[in-house]
Amino acid sequence: MTSDTCSSSGESIMSDLPSEMLAALDGIETTAAFSSFGKFPVVDPGIHVADIGHIYLPLNRSQAQQLITKAHQAPYGKGSETLVDTSVRNTWELNSDQFELRRPDWNAHLREIAARVARDLGIESRISVELYKMLLYEKGAMFKPHTDTEKAPGMVATLVIGLPSAHEGGEVVVKHRGLTQSFKLSSTQCSYASWYSDVVHEVLPVTSGYRWVLTYNITLDGAQTHRPTRLARPDALCLYKTIKHWAEQDGEPSDHFWYKLDHEYTQASISLKALKTRDLACVQTLDEISTKVPVDIFLAVLEKQEIGSCAYDTYDSGHHGYHPFEELIDASYEVKSLVDLDGNQVLKGRRLDPSEILQADCFEDLPIAEEYYQGYQGNWGPEATHWYRVTAVAIVARHSTPSFLLGSLAKVVNPIMGPAWGRDDQKTISWVVDYYAKRIIDSDSDTSLLQSFKELMSMIWNMDVKTPEPRRAPFLGEDTTMQVLKAAVRTRDGAFFKECAQRHHGKLSEGFFTWAQEQLASGQITLTEVQDGLRAAVFAYPLFRTRYAAVARLLPLNNPMPDEVRRWVHEMNDQLLDPQGQQQLEYQDGVFLVLIARGYYGASYALTRISTFINHTRQNPCFVIGVLSRMHEDVKSGHLPEAAGMAIFQSTAHKLLSRLNSSSFNLTESPPRPTRRPDTVEARYRRRYESSRPAEPEPANPAIFGPHFASFARALIDYEGEDNLIDRLWQGIISSATSISAPTFQALWLPFLHAMIPFYTDNPEHPSRPRFHQVIATLLKAYITTYVGPRPVEDPSNVRPQQVTCFLRERGGCNLCPQLNTFLRDPTRTEWKWSLFSSERAHIHQVLDMGGVACTHVTDRSVFSNSSYQGLVLTKTFPHAAQTQRAWAQRKAEAGRKLHEFRPADLRAALGPKYWDIVEMRCLETPGRQAVGQGVEGTTSATTARSHPQRQDRYAGSSSSVLRKKRSAAEAEIVDLTGDY
Ligand SMILES: O=C(O)CCC(=O)C(=O)O
Ligand SMILES: [Fe+2]
């Protein structure tokens, strides 16, 4: 492009915009080179090789020969393979652990050379240089043209240090963008040569002597690239004008272009700071232009895929190059991966229209990047797929960036599966949203970017509306949701923020509210701007306690906030503390109720709010226990007034205990929570598959945990009122033990005992101790009886025959059935793979099915393809009764483990003479006794218990003052399992 064309570009009518754009981009120049060479005075690195010692400079013949005895033939990389082929590379090589460089200041010299190289190559980031190999080329040695593979993450270039050694030939030849350079290392001095890894280079054959080098990998450090201002340069200004003109034209058919870069980059490394020479100059210029013209710039790996038929390969193809096509069957194009300039992933696998690439011949004459070869496959083949890749920069008109990024997404939705969002689509949506949010949060964004972001979000919400099941809508993770809300606040558009805020489906970290609080406190945002959105965000949480926790973040204790904010938060709390319409209140909600009420209303009004709340909601006991436990703690620590607090505690606890019945002690299942993740197609399939497997006992998901319950019990013990609350609780548990479900024991009651035992160990004289011991005995006994149950009796009607009857026996029988019966009767064999013809297999299938034998029979076609001779896999299944027996033994072992988790001393103290009966689970073995199995409602053993009243008395212990008290009618109903063995 001449400067003439450019100076007029602002005014002239561009007939062919793509070629103008291409010329402007091609016109970007750089002073940086793709290779760098030089010499420097001899510095001896102090090379030391084991068994040889110091290697002297310049290299002499005898030491060269000694080095060769230590060296190996250097391999070269091809695709993912490493090969040795002396017709491609013929060099002796020593790995970096085979020698040492002992001169202390060698690295200082190396750094100086590296700095020179970096300057020549135009690398602005900080670099590291790492020793890789020592190479020795003798006469005839060479390395054919190649590019270097990325041997370390972030590797951009190779540095070769030539050490003084007499030789002829062995020039390094580098080629890039039509330019060729050749360099000969010095025989008497030190020299260096360096090139970008993707530059094609070769080492010409050495004709005499030894060429001796050290090779190093140059890698980029993580530091940011320094971005100079380029727009003052004429080439950059020209590009600026061209793009501005394009962006301002209405009705321009193309809203984005791809421009192929000079160098190639791997998917993993691509980002602005990894760009080299002219690529860096181009993209930096575009980046700068994007701050002045509404365009967005991305980097991408573009891929062409070709499928073609090829000749049948008689030898192992992998080592002998790729398979040329005889006929091209299909070609397609894809954006393999697209990133922002910092290298953050934005897209993967978007369709690509090659006419959008400015360079028409972009994929021509490229080496194949990857091949997949398939030999004959039945009646087609052989066939190969070839992939070609280039790296490109995308220039997108900002107003259409959302559709550019998400446009191909809708097409991915599978018409058979329905409008479900695949995991990849979800990922893409999150990446794209993250990309926008990050840009908006990180910088002062202009209106075009904000507008584009709003469009993007509304596109996503519309996807949401289109799907019939809202749970299958595109789903943003917790981090992305937070980013969206922060960015939405930054738009300073209250209505838009509210739209975003009300859609978080509970997937918003409370950290967002802390962030909002900081923004409010520092005056970055005003309450007017965000109050509707914040309210929406709070009420979008499905749970009471998370709503509270969110609001609490807005007014951190001991942190002065503007009065206006303070007042507003109090209003919010009033709304939240309205007992009307509250659902799903659990233990933690109870704790939060106390915390919030006390935090916002001051000690005495808090109590009023709390009791009003409790009185107006018929809540589950777990919630009330949460309230009481927390209140008790706060009264003890002086955060709530003692007298009033205890009064409420006492009356509430009293009411609670009198309301408790046997089902209360079982009520540990948490109400179903809103699904955390949308129901993906995969999840549905997984469930369908899983439901065909035998059900395992569901672990209980307790709404209250053992330690919670124990702290409530401790609160009752601390409260030494007239009405002996703790004794009421203990009695309640004892009387309900038999109706506690098996999973509840493990989830709640066993951990509860573990949490409670230490208190009585520390307070052996406590009057409620004997009653607690009774609780332990009752619960453990009920656990064993309910969870393990009695040993199942073998039911003879359940035992399936373990042999077959051959229906050919009238005709003398077959010779297969006797073999089958031998297998079936042999208890040591459970599986047999039997090779049979199809008619034989059919017979065996038949006799097994007719006889109802517990043995599966499946044909295995994996061994002989297309043959009627196949393996038949026979697997004995355990008869039902044996399975039941095994399950019982497993439950018993599990219960045994649980009992062993208690300290024997504690159990001995609590169980007294019944210790061994319990820990050995003797009650289960008693024949004729009807015990119950897991999950089955227990038949009460009340009758048995009552028939041994003396046992109860004996066990209750005469030491208990509690038990000497007059018993109420309710107490008389107590069923004591401890006496019943
Ligand atoms: O020996 C040289 O100068 C270059 C060696 C080389 O190209 C390599 O190791 O990849
Ligand atoms: Fe190389």
Image: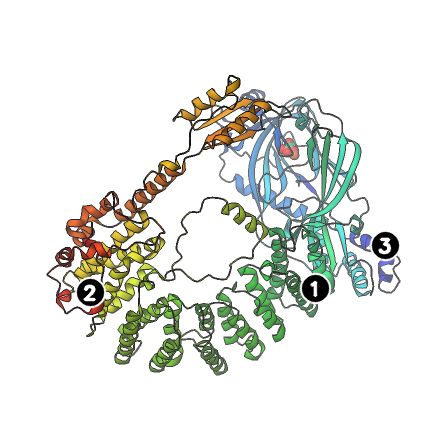
Q: Quadrant of residue 180?
A: top right
The percent position of residue 775, horizontal first and vertical second, equals: 23, 58
Marker count (numbered): 3
Checking the image for residue 859, the label placed there is none
Q: Nearer the viewer, mark 3 or mark 2?
A: 2
Tag 1 secondary structure = loop
Quarter of the displayed picture in which ligand 2 can be seen: top right
Residue for badge 2: 972
The structure residue drawn at horizontal position 23% and vertical position 55%, both measured from the top left corner, is: 778
Closest to the observer, 70 or 429: 429
The structure residue drawn at horizontal position 46% and vertical position 26%, both measured from the top left corner, is: 804
Q: Say if 239 sits above or below 591 in the image.
A: above
Distance between the alpha carbons at the discs numbered 3 and 2: 106 Å
Q: Say if 817 sits above or below 328 in the image.
A: above
The percent position of residue 456, horizontal first and vertical second, equals: 67, 63
Distance between the alpha carbons at the discs numbered 1 and 3: 25 Å
Report whether 865 appears left or right of 256.
Answer: left
Tag 2 secondary structure = helix
The percent position of residue 168, horizontal first and vertical second, equals: 69, 25
Residue for badge 1: 291
Tag 3 near tag 2, CB within 8 Å: no
The amino acid at mark 3 is: Thr
Tag 1 near tag 3, CB within 8 Å: no
Task: Pick whichever of labels 1 and 3 is earlier in the sequence.
Answer: 3
The percent position of residue 618, horizontal first and vertical second, equals: 38, 73
Q: Say if 195 sits above or below 2 in the image.
A: above
Residue 637 visible in the displayed image? no
Q: Say if 263 sits above or below 204 in the image.
A: below
Neighbor class of circle 3 (other Cα within 10 Å; few <14, some 14-19, many 20+) is few
The amino acid at mark 2 is: Ala
Q: Quadrant of residue 3?
A: bottom right
Closest to the observer, 75 or 906: 906
